[in-house]
Amino acid sequence: MYALMDCSNFFVSCERLFNPLLHKKPVIVLSSNDGCAIARSDEVKALSIPMGAPLFKIKDLVKAHDIKIFSSNFTLYMDISQRVIEILDTQGFEFEPYSIDESFISLPDTWSKEELEHWGISLKKKIDQWLGIPVRIGFGSTKTLAKLSNELAKKEPSGVLHVSSIPDAIFEALEVNNVWGIGKNNTNSLNSHGIRTIGDLLLSPEPWLKKTFSVVMLKTVRELKGQPCFLLSSNPEPQKSMVISRSFADDITSREDLSERISIFASRAGEKLRHSGLLTKELGVFIRTSPFKENSYSNSITLPLLHHTNDTKELISHSLVCLKHIFKEGKKYTKAGIFMCDMTDNVKQDNLFEATVTPTPSNLMNAMDQLNQRYGTSSINFGACGLKVKGGMRNLARRDNLSPNYTSKWSDILTVT
């Protein structure tokens, strides 16, 4: 038996956690550069403001309804997410963090529906009491059913729902885009074949689904029928690729300024690789101007490294070589990034003419990581990252409505007077 625990309106809930005046008030959390709405309180949803709405298009509604606006504070959100995971760890069951605000939990198959719901309500109360974060929990014999019941639990006063409590008529009438793993493209394709509801999907021949779509679609349908196909993954496979990018608050025209941004991306990439115990053999760079303006330009290049590495010096040097190949003078760049492939947690064959490389970070890298962990991100960095942008990645984007880091920065801790 599976449960899916989902933190309700997570980013909004994190902002409300330390600001009681926001409760029952309309709140929006924005994407990078304060561009679009990526989290909306129920009060905002009631105003028919859609997910992803650009801020400039809803300014009149924001003013008319006194909607509180916040920039994304991922430092705060990740810390609260970790605290939720620590509570799950106290339950004694295997679980899989699926995203920053969701986790699948494996529960005993011998438990009755009543026992499951009682456990769910108890966990919900504990998280609310210990953290103040509202959650909802859905139960099902498969991960897909648990995900579906979790979505329908939004309408339950208790916030807890067992899939068996969903009437067959309602379950089968749900549109296929409500099913976990069926995105927009698959929905359109299924609709073109006359499959619009879960009921239609369940009646479709399995060999035809596998041939027309994929084995993943076949597994999804079997999960809807109660046959577990997607098992809990407590030890996920090592990451094979990584992208680190940002849209810029202001256009960048000089190669020097763009080089500093690319160096910051490479520095962050090195930190993430070392934190995960990974190495990369292939690194690329992409840059682009605004696609909405005339003579727009975008380009990318990927070049192999001499050997697998997670050394920031090598990553920065390599990324700047990539940038040199694709940079064009006279362009106004709005976004750039780096991407890494051929990542591994094991040592691969080295270059025959190079010294043997081990996955152990150098003393310099270890020292930098420890200093940055102790004194804050980018407290110490390479000169290639420049001095114009302080604070590294976090200060590359516009964040005019950023809340304090209440739980991770001494100067931002709330004081009681």
Image (spheres, grey):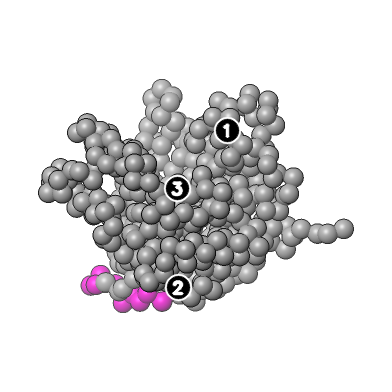
Whichever of labels 3 and 2 marks the residue nearer the N terminus, that label is 2
Return the residue at label 2: 93
Q: Which residues are magenta?
A: 349-360
In this rendered view, identify the residue nearer to me: 33 or 312.
33
Q: Mark 2: give few (<14), some (14-19) or many (20+) Cα within 10 Å.
A: few
Whichever of labels 1 and 3 marks the residue nearer the N terminus, that label is 1
The residue shown at (61%, 65%) is 126
Return the residue at label 3: 151
Residue 222: horizontal and vertical position, in percent? 24, 54
Position of the N terminus, as image quadrant, is bottom left
Q: Amino acid at mark 1?
A: Ala
Q: Is residue 80 visible?
A: yes
The residue shown at (27%, 41%) is 199
Residue 176: horizontal and vertical position, in percent? 31, 40
Is 362 covered by the magenta stretch? no
The residue shown at (49%, 40%) is 247
Return the residue at label 1: 46
Q: Quadrant of residue 241?
A: bottom left
Distance of label 3 from label 2 (alpha carbons): 22 Å
Q: Amino acid at mark 2?
A: Phe
Q: Amino acid at mark 3?
A: Glu
What is the secondary structure assignment of the residue under circle 2? Answer: loop
In this rendered view, identify the residue nearer to me: 222 or 59.
222
Q: Quadrant of residue 169?
A: top left
What is the secondary structure assignment of the residue under circle 1? Answer: loop
Distance of label 1 from label 3 (alpha carbons): 17 Å
